[in-house]
Amino acid sequence: MHIPDGFLDTKTIITTAVISAGALGYGIKKVNQKLGERQVPLLGLTAAFIFAAQMLNFPVVGGTSGHFLGGVLAAVLLGPWAACLIMAVVLIVQSIGFADGGLTALGANIFNMGVVGGILSYYVFVAVKKCVPRTRLGFLSSVAIASWLSIVLASASGAFQLAVSGTSPLHVALPAMVGVHMLIGIGEAIIATAVVSIVLGTRPDLVSTYYVPVSATKER
């Protein structure tokens, strides 16, 4: 999902860069307003975990492989705007330090994995959470569904960018990207749900999106 240099045309590069820059600018403002002191260490730990997890690829069908995204995980723990900032930091380090994703495509990659995979997918999580029981199991189910869908949405966004740029026709890029990432999303859902479950079991107060269930004592 890390688009390299040379795959996107100028208009797509500029458009996604402007949108991503705007999201990051607004995100910095929101994080400064809402992030508490107790969540600052979690911000760094989450970024480090996502960076490390993205370095590990797991095989999919046909010799392809995929990696963890982490946008929904970060959004569930810290909110959507912090998630976008975390994804941006991870992608910048990967691009500059490891040549994983092109510098000219950095705006597009942040858009796909930070804006779509983090912010948009967070609101999918919120919508799902409203439809399930207000229990710990319901909460974790919302995390799993949104995490799976975040991978699918981000890959679809990348496919559209490749199609608009003339790199690959949409009827080829979309099913190829989405099909593989539907499988990758299963791993995403498992990892994100497991991490959130562990945090809930130890420090539920650090999960900013967690509600207090009716059976709070039993659930926690």
Image (cartoon, rainbow, N blue to C red):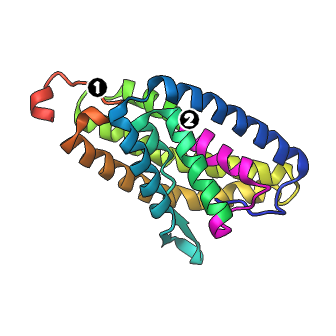
> How many neighbours does mark 1 have within 10 angstroms: few (below 14), some (14-19), or many (20 or more)?
some
Answer whether residue 106 is magenta in the image.
Answer: yes
Query: Residue 64 lies in what quarter of the image?
Result: bottom right
Q: In the visual, does 22 lie left or right of 134?
A: right
Element carrying mark 1: loop
Quadrant of the frame with the N terminus? bottom right
For the record, the magenta segment spans 97-118
Percent position of residue 181, x then y = 56, 58
Name the outermost residue toward the bottom.
Answer: 63
Percent position of residue 39, x then y = 36, 36
Residue appearing at x 26%, y 26% in the figure: 134
Query: Residue 177 lies in what quarter of the image?
Result: bottom right
Name the outermost residue toward the left.
Answer: 218
**Rendered image: mark on residue 61:** none
Q: In the visual, does 100 lie left or right of 14?
A: left
Q: Can residue 158 be seen at all in this image of the molecule?
A: yes
Percent position of residue 206, x then y = 30, 36
**Rendered image: mark on residue 119:** 2
Q: Mark 1 points at which residue?
A: 211
Q: Is residue 137 above or below residue 134?
A: below
Residue appearing at x 78%, y 49% in the figure: 161
Q: Which of marks 2 and 1 is nearer the N terminus?
A: 2
Pointers 2 and 1 in contact (C-beta within 8 Å): no
Separation (CA) of disc 2 from disc 1: 19 Å
Q: What residue type is labelled 2?
A: Ile
Q: Which amino acid does label 1 sit on?
A: Tyr
